[in-house]
Image (spheres, grey):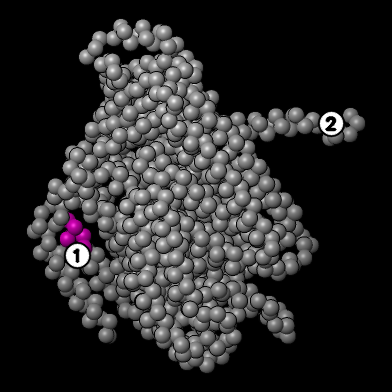
């Protein structure tokens, strides 16, 4: 019971702070590129938490300290302070420049062409489904809302997706990849992904594309390379 | 509102109430028309949002079919952006800019009336889509072609959407011209540019954005109309057109539009905080500079909505989109600087300003996340964006809308609103807003994409969606409290007097509601707080103010 | 330079600079044209208008000890035609703009014309007629 306030442990405070951040955390990525995005997100989140705490702290302090109470004298009519304003111009400016440079390096990491593209997959979005064609094999998987397609990918290989569309704009989106790209008629887009963790992941269309937009789902199954080869051999060549 | 029975028409002889309002050229009446219409649209579009939230509460489809859902989110976005937030701001500007600068009316009173009628008839045209056999427009408020071309959205609703938006857009452009001319041309003697209330500065910058951004939308809409009806190929990728071109044109309007939707409300908050802090604004010139910077930057950030198209320079737009956060940061610190050392009275308008600051802070911070292209690759077109944008537009603009209503209702009607109901409204709205929109960030990160009426149970989105729907119910309840407060105060509110808040700016130097020509007598304008200066002079006749 | 003009020139300079940087970084024609549109509109239309409007302001309507830009040059509209007013202004009741039904009629004419685009050109006849009447009466009313 002696001075209980002194014993409030720092880890507990940090734990509470982390608990507050938890609902704002991104899920773990299952690919290399998404991993970089996730790290960048976490950095942003920590900076954001600091900024939020500072501003809310100042706000809360002024609300508590300067609220109108009986006997409070007339406040001094103070019109500003240019030096102070310069300080809070320069600090956010430095902060966003830093965040911009970080973003730039991550952007490069995400978009960088791999030394060797191990596998090319042509992804065509259409109203309302997907067609995945594996380059150089003739294997093609097509799915519709009734029978969603499965995109089988080898783990640890550099996959280059070639994204196309012939009707409206769709967006190739696997949430656990933490990267997405649009399929745009009249344009060929590229997305590079290296899946690291085997598993089954949900895929969807992210760009609104009409009536059944919500049902343009697909599934990604990431498997070990040898099982991928076996699977590829089993497919009928269309 | 109750202005009609107290305005004694001396120079006009209206035949009846309806004719009087339909033919009015009085900036205050046109302002009231704008305010009432836009709040009505807010309730309509809010009801649409409630329907959508009801549908999303649990997996499976219970309330709406796909087509209706698509129409509803399209109309919700369109109505909120084009027929509520911006017209509400224009309504405030119409009513208060002439009062703030000591003028009797705007420069072009008849043009002013025309802008209102173009806006209302345009909105009615867009709504008429619901009466057609195929329903209203259902391609999202962003209307990306090719989806919005006739091949994929053949209904009449889409054409009505285009024509209605163009009509109200032309009205808005003309309104901007009128406001700029009024601010430049009608200021009272002594009212220099740097003595204008910050609200007027923000309206000036907003009007400049409207002036340069809306013609681009009008042109784009005309091109889309030609594509749909006269076999054009502007946005047809197969025939030499480009699907990306629309996105450039739309967002060149669309992003300034976001600042058009928030800058006037920065102005509102900047008027209210000093009054309830008992201090002048901290750093007036800094505020003007920050507003100008936001206005200028806002023209160069449009393609941060297009990071995932692979068709734009991502680093350029990342840089500009992050830089635009800095002037907004300056405003935050200046607001805190204004409160620092003051004597803060937490009446309802001030409470809403506090809510505005907290909520907009969150929306601003998540905005920086989305300005980073890699993070946008993860979050784009998911509920993360929906959450972000509602923290900005609901937590920001709508909280400030209510701050402005509680602050200026006594001036418009001559009656006070109930403080008790106002506080209930505020706390319910704050709780409801966070319950509704905060879970959306996590939903988006987990992969719930935008604009879907349903999700599979296996996605695990159910719990957070249910929470969000409950929150939307709380929001609806808070708005009912507001409506009750309005109803009660219009009839039985306590008389307000000329200056119930001990205000600073010229609107408090005249009657509530003001006479048709606004002022019988204008205090000398020697600082940005003429009414405060006069109050000080009256209290201590020998001392002169140092404003 | 008047504050009013400076306001637009600043926005124009910023967008002009942004257009140059953007053109170099992205080689994108559409965005460059869009960014260039703002300074072009300011240089060709807004700035000349602002300058022309500002001429009458050289008569000093701002005797109350203001620094910087003077007060409104259209101030006479509300009864400030006398430059040497007292510090506290007594404002006489000025005749305000008349009520007018022509703005509403003009908007309805616009609605009819756009309905013509959607439902058939026969809407244009009443639309154009009403528009012409509204414009004529509107202009006529300005004299009275």
Give the alpha-carbon distance from disc 2 to disc 1, as whole Å: 77 Å
Q: Nearer the viewer, residue B493 or C79?
A: C79
Disc sitting over residue A7 in the figure:
2
Disc sitting over residue B365 in the figure:
none
For label 1, the SS is helix
**Residue hosting label 1:** C109
What is the span of residues highlighted in magenta in the rendered image? C110-115
Q: Nearer the viewer, residue B179 or B310?
A: B310
Q: Is residue B477 magenta?
A: no
Residue displayed at 31% across by 55% down: B217
Task: Please tell me in which quadrant of the rendered image residue A186 appears.
Answer: top left
- Residue occupying the far left of the picture: C122
Q: Is residue C113 magenta?
A: yes
- Residue occupying the far front of the picture: A115
Classify the position of the C terminus of chain B by image quarter: bottom right
Q: In x, y percent, where is residue B508? A: 56, 72
Residue displayed at 59% across by 73% down: B528
Q: Can residue B129 be seen? A: yes
The rendered magenta stretch, by its main secondary structure, is classed as: helix
Q: Can residue B511 be seen? A: no
Specify few, some or many for label 2: CA neighbours under 10 Å numbering under 14, 14-19, or 20 or more: few
Classify the position of the N terminus of chain B by image quarter: bottom left
Specify few, some or many for label 1: CA neighbours under 10 Å numbering under 14, 14-19, or 20 or more: many
Q: In x, y percent, where is residue B540? A: 72, 81
> Is B369 situated above or below A165?
below
Task: Please tell me in which quadrant of the rendered image residue A166 appears.
Answer: top left
Q: In x, y percent, where is residue B319? A: 50, 49
Residue displayed at 60% across by 30% down: A22
Q: In x, y percent, where is residue B6? A: 44, 72
């Amino acid at each position: 019971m002696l001075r209980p306030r002194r014993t409030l442990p720092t880890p507990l405070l940090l734990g509470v702070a982390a608990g507050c951040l938890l609902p704002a955390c991104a899920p773990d990525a299952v690919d290399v590129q998404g991993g970089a995005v996730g790290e960048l997100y976490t950095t942003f989140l920590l900076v954001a938490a600091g900024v939020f705490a500072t501003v809310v702290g100042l706000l809360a302090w002024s609300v508590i300290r300067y609220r109108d109470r009986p006997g409070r004298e007339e406040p001094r009519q103070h019109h500003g302070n240019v030096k102070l304003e310069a300080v809070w111009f320069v600090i956010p400016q430095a902060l966003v420049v830093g965040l911009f440079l970080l973003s730039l390096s991550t952007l490069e990491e995400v978009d960088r062409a791999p030394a060797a593209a191990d596998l090319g997959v042509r992804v065509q979005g259409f109203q309302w489904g997907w067609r995945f064609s594996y380059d150089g094999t003739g294997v093609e998987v097509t799915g519709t809302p009734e029978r969603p397609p499965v995109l089988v990918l080898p783990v640890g290989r550099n996959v280059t997706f070639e994204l196309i569309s012939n009707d409206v704009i769709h967006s190739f989106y696997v949430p656990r990849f933490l990267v997405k790209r649009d399929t745009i008629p009249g344009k060929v887009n590229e997305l590079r992904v290296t899946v690291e963790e085997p598993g089954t992941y949900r895929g969807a269309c992210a760009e609104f594309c009409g009536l059944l937009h919500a049902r343009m789902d697909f599934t990604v199954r990431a498997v070990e390379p040898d099982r991928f080869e076996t699977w590829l051999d089993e497919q009928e060549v269309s | 509102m109750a202005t009609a029975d107290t305005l004694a028409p001396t120079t006009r002889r209206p035949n009846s109430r309806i004719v009087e309002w339909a033919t009015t050229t009085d900036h205050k009446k046109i302002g009231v028309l704008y305010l009432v219409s836009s709040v009505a649209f807010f309730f309509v579009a809010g009801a649409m949002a409630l329907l959508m939230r009801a549908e999303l509460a649990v997996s499976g489809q219970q309330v709406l079919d796909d087509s209706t859902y698509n129409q509803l989110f399209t109309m919700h976005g369109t109505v909120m952006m084009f027929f509520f937030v911006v017209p509400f701001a224009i309504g405030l500007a119409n009513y208060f800019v002439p009062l703030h600068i000591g003028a009797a009316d705007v420069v072009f009173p008849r043009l002013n009336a025309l802008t209102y009628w173009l806006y209302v008839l345009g909105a009615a045209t867009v709504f008429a889509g619901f009466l057609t056999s195929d329903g209203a427009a259902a391609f999202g408020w962003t209307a990306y072609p090719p989806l919005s071309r006739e091949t994929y959205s053949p209904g009449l609703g889409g054409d009505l959407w285009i024509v209605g938006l163009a009509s109200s857009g032309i009205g808005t452009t003309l309104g901007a011209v009128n406001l700029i001319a009024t601010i430049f041309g009608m200021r009272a003697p002594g009212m220099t540019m740097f003595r204008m209330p910050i609200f007027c500065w923000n309206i000036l910058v907003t009007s400049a954005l409207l002036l340069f951004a809306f013609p681009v939308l009008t042109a784009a809409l005309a091109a889309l109309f030609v594509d749909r009806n006269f076999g054009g190929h502007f946005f047809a990728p197969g025939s030499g057109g480009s699907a990306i071109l629309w996105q450039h044109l739309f967002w060149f309007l669309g992003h300034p539009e976001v600042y058009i939707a928030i800058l006037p409300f920065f102005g509102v908050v900047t008027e209210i905080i000093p009054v309830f802090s008992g201090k002048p604004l901290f750093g007036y010139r800094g505020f003007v500079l920050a507003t100008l910077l936001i206005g200028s930057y806002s023209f160069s950030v449009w393609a941060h909505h297009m990071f995932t198209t692979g068709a734009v320079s991502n680093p350029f737009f990342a840089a500009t989109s992050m830089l635009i956060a800095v002037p907004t940061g300056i405003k935050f610190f200046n607001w805190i600087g204004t409160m620092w050392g003051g004597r803060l009275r937490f009446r309802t308008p001030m409470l809403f300003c506090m809510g505005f600051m907290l909520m907009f802070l969150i929306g601003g911070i998540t905005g920086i996340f989305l300005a980073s292209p890699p993070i946008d690759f993860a979050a784009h077109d998911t509920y993360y964006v929906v959450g972000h944008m509602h923290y900005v537009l609901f937590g920001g603009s709508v909280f400030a809308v209510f701050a402005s209503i509680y602050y200026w209702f006594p001036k418009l009607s001559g009656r006070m609103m109930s403080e008790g109901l106002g506080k209930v409204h505020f706390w319910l709205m704050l709780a409801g807003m966070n319950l509704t929109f905060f879970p959306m960030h996590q939903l988006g990160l987990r992969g719930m994409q935008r604009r879907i009426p349903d999700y599979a149970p296996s996605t695990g989105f159910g719990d957070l969606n249910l929470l969000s729907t409950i929150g939307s119910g709380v929001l609806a309840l808070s708005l009912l409290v507001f409506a009750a407060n309005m109803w009660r105060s219009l009839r039985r509110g306590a008389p307000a007097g000329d200056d119930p808040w001990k205000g600073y700016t010229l609107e408090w130097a005249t009657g509530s509601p003001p006479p048709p020509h606004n002022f019988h007598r204008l205090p000398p304008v020697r600082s940005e707080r003429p009414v405060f200066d006069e109050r000080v002079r009256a209290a201590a006749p020998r001392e002169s103010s140092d404003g | 330079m008047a504050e009013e003009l400076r306001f637009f020139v600043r926005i124009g300079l910023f967008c002009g600079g942004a257009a140059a940087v953007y053109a170099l970084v992205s080689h994108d024609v559409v965005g460059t044209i869009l960014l260039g549109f703002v300074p072009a509109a300011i240089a060709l239309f807004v700035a000349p208008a602002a300058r022309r409007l500002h001429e009458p302001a050289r008569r000093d309507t701002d005797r109350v000890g203001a620094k910087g830009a003077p007060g409104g040059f259209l101030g006479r509209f509300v009864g400030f035609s006398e430059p040497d007013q007292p510090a506290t202004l007594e404002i006489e009741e000025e005749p305000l703009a008349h009520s007018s039904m022509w703005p509403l009629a003009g908007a309805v004419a616009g609605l009819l014309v756009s309905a013509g685009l959607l439902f058939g050109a026969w809407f244009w006849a009443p639309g154009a007629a009403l528009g012409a009447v509204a414009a004529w009466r509107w202009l006529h009313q300005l004299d009275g």
